[in-house]
Amino acid sequence: MRFDSVIDAIGHTPLVRLRFDEAPDVEVHAKLELQNLYGMKDRVARQAITHALDTGGLAPGAPIVESSSGTMALGVALVGRALGHPVHIVTDPRIDSITLAKLRALGVQVHIVEHMTGQGWQSARLERLDELLRVLPDAFCPRQYHNPQNPLAYQALAGELIADLGHIDVLVGSVGSGGSLCGTARALRERLPGLRTVGVDAVGSALFGQPDRPARLQSGLGNSLIPGNLDPGQIDEVHWLSDREAFAATQGLAAEQALFCGNTSGSVYRVLGHLCRTARPGSRIVGIFPDRGDRYHANVYSSDHWREHGLHEADERRAPVRVEYGEPVSAWSYCPLPRHEEVEDVAGAAAVR
């Protein structure tokens, strides 16, 4: 497949059928967004930056500034540098050495905050981002958590799924900014109104009525803040996995399916296994796998990291427990998502706690 630029090469990712011996009559497919040049957020960066150029929000050659500790940083670096823009990334000490090396190799200026603030690392990064925007008044910030171009970027992903499969019964995806799962689901439902959507979150994330625990180890999903791009109306059910469960599932994905991925994909894989065992024969389920495992070599795949954080001794559920929305969880649990108004009421109560 030939492309005229690295930007044109974004998307067109493989769709691979996974094998679950316990459910041979259910189709389970992995959309390998990790096969983008740097990961799934390449789509968001392309959509947000090219839209800003087209609409005048970004002047030719002006700086681009974003807050990210992972693949959004790399996507912005890819698109911004390819189009000739200086790129500034605000991140935190959790950034892995591989991502940091890639950003610096691409000529990005990396700003690492030193301490958490009121709402963890997210708020610390956003405060530093605002400082940068004051000294770079002509800069453009994609603001992935609130920019509507984030979910719109996944119309193309939905189109690829329709082209490859035609019909899908269940879509499963991790939730961080809310863009990928909500954007893909919204676009798919234009053709598939009966689609069921399952979100995957981390224990200790505040996205769905849970108390925030900024010290959680998972990255790439979960959030300490509620992003504007999270549309609960697009999600029918949410699952939460603990750090141990997510990391173990990620190692299982490599051992069982030969896919070396990050913990976002591993968490989705764990939920896919559960759903296929409980689905009716002939069902077709798709999981979105956001990024490859390189960034996680020193944590998810490291025995030293497991020992340091006591993960070997932590409990691990082999099946989820159903809970009421807003009930605090500590291990794999799930809940059908209530109506939007009820979600807001419970989320407010959790924030007060």
Image: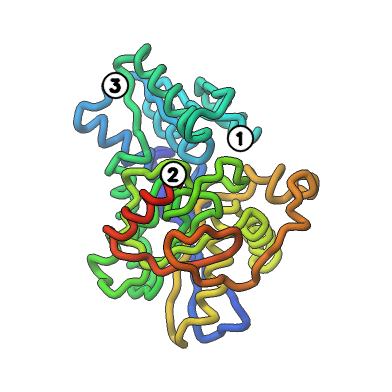
The answer to whether residue 34 is left or right of residue 194 is right
The answer to whether residue 104 is left or right of residue 192 is right
Q: Amino acid at mark 1?
A: Arg
- From the viewer's perspective, is residue 260 above or below residue 8? below
Q: Amino acid at mark 2?
A: Lys
**Residue in the picture at 77% in, 57% down:** 313
Colour setup of the view: rainbow
* C-alpha gap between disc 2 and disc 1: 18 Å
- From the viewer's perspective, is residue 24 above or below residue 287? below
State the image coordinates of residue 317 (x, y, percent, origin top left): 65, 68
User: Dot 3: what SS?
Assistant: loop
Instruction: Give the residue pinned by disc 1.
Output: 94
Q: Residue furthest front?
A: 353
The answer to whether residue 272 is left or right of residue 153 is right
Residue 266 location, quadrant: bottom right
**Residue in the picture at 45% in, 86% down:** 280
State the image coordinates of residue 100 (x, y, percent, origin top left): 60, 30
